[in-house]
Amino acid sequence: MAADVVVTMGCGDACPLLPRKYYEDWELDDPSSKTIEQIRPIRDELKNRVTSLLHQLGSASADTQRSGPTPAGTAVSASRHQ
């Protein structure tokens, strides 16, 4: 399996290595066994990070399009290991 972008959540170097062009590890609190009030800030932080990454990738895609064609489709893989 390969992806253009891999975002892991809290596993750091313990995650399997996947061929990719871009990698980020997002440390987020584990929402299991939390109340809905405690989960909402985690959800909001995740939304902000995804939005930021999409903007960043959109900018990179726009830069690439100016210099040549981009590959068809972009795979995004998310993984959470405990």
Image: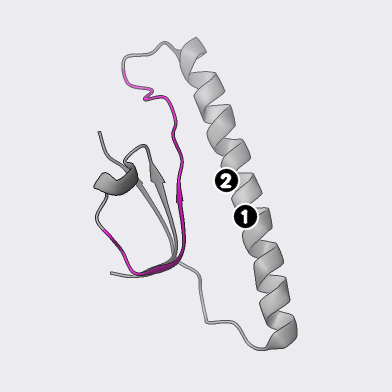
Dot 2 corresponds to which residue?
50
Does the stretch in magenta take in 28? Answer: yes
The C terminus - image quarter: top left
At label 1, the amino acid type is Leu
The location of residue 59, given as percent across then percent down, is 71, 64
Dot label at residue 23? none
Residue found at the far bottom of this picture: 68
At label 2, the amino acid type is Val
Task: Determine whether 22 is above or below 41 in the image.
Answer: below
Tell me: 3 left or right of 68. left
Q: How crowded is mark 1: few (under 14 residues within 10 Å), some or many (20 or more)?
A: few
Dot 1 corresponds to which residue?
54
Residue found at the far front of this picture: 13
The residue depicted at 58 percent of the width and 37 percent of the height is 47
The residue depicted at 65 percent of the width and 47 percent of the height is 52
The N terminus - image quarter: bottom left
Are the residues flagged by discs 2 and 1 in contact, CB closer than 8 Å?
yes
Q: What element carries label 2?
A: helix
Tell me: 6 left or right of 43. left
| Among the 4 quarters of the image, the one containing residue 68 | bottom right
Find the magenta span and give its range.
Answer: 17-32
Task: Determine whether 24 is above or below 63 in the image.
Answer: above
The location of residue 71, given as percent across then percent down, is 53, 82
Tell me: 17 left or right of 50. left
Tell me: 12 left or right of 65. left
* Separation (CA) of disc 2 from disc 1: 6 Å
Main secondary structure type of the part rendered in magenta: loop
The residue depicted at 70 percent of the width and 81 percent of the height is 65
